[in-house]
Image (cartoon, rainbow, N blue to C red):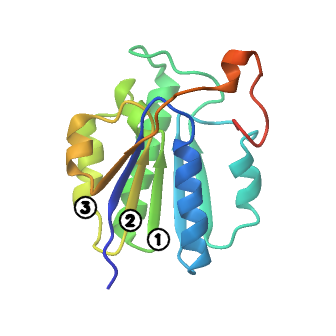
Amino acid sequence: MRKGLTLVYTGNGKGKTTAALGLALRAIGHGQRVFMIQFMKGSAEYGEIQAAQYLPHFTLVQKGLPTFVKKGDPGREDLRLAREGLELARQVIQAGEHELVILDEVNVAVDYGLLKAEDVLELIEIKPEGVTLVLTGRYASDKIMEKADMVSEVKDIKHHYRQGIPSQPGIEY
């Protein structure tokens, strides 16, 4: 029986979602099933949305709008989609049919008031032994980091955006 873990990728640097996707690719390479829910993202422009159709045993569902969420004052639709994402996560985790479950930007969803940290902590608690849960996004709460088996902080040291280079397909999205 494999030991499922809770992993957190947080920090103000670029690469948290990319790290989770790298982990997904590794898991798929070992024949594992991966389910990824993207909170606060709702655009088909993301490269991972395009790539998902080519990856066996990989399901990706977006639960967000293609627009930005106003911190502290999310719209009704933002709240509804976040709650739907949380419920879907609960169902997928409890079913135990996927060895890896990624909740992308869930830490931001908590920080922005779309979800409560307690809701995410409950997901960690109900996780079957063989399921690894990955939580990404800036602003991971102290309680979530305490409960995790691993926390990696991605630190922003230098970013090409500050040199006037705009977001690029395949790099930022």
Between label 1 and label 2, give the one nearer the viewer.
2
Q: Nearer the viewer, residue 108 or 37?
A: 108
Q: Which mark is residue 98?
A: 1
Upstream in sequence: badge 1 or badge 2: 1
Q: CA distance from mark 3 to mark 2?
A: 12 Å
Q: Residue furthest front?
A: 157
| Number of numbered discs visible in the structure rendering | 3
- Name the residue that disc number 2 marks: 132
Q: Which mark is residue 126?
A: 3
Q: Name the amino acid type tagged 2.
A: Thr
Assess disc 1: are there few (<14), some (14-19) or many (≥20) residues with their C-alpha within 10 Å of its C-alpha. Answer: many
Q: Residue at x 42, y 54 (%)?
A: 134
Q: Nearer the viewer, residue 130 or 61?
A: 130
Q: Assess whether mark 2 and mark 1 are in contact (beta carbons under 8 angstroms).
A: no
Residue 78 is left or right of residue 116, and the answer is: right
**Looking at the rendering, which quadrant does residue 112 occupy?**
top left
Vertical arrangement, residue 134 with respect to residue 144, above or below = below
Q: Assess whether mark 3 and mark 1 are in contact (beta carbons under 8 angstroms).
A: no
Q: Looking at the picture, how far across and down is residue 68, in whole percent?
A: 58, 21
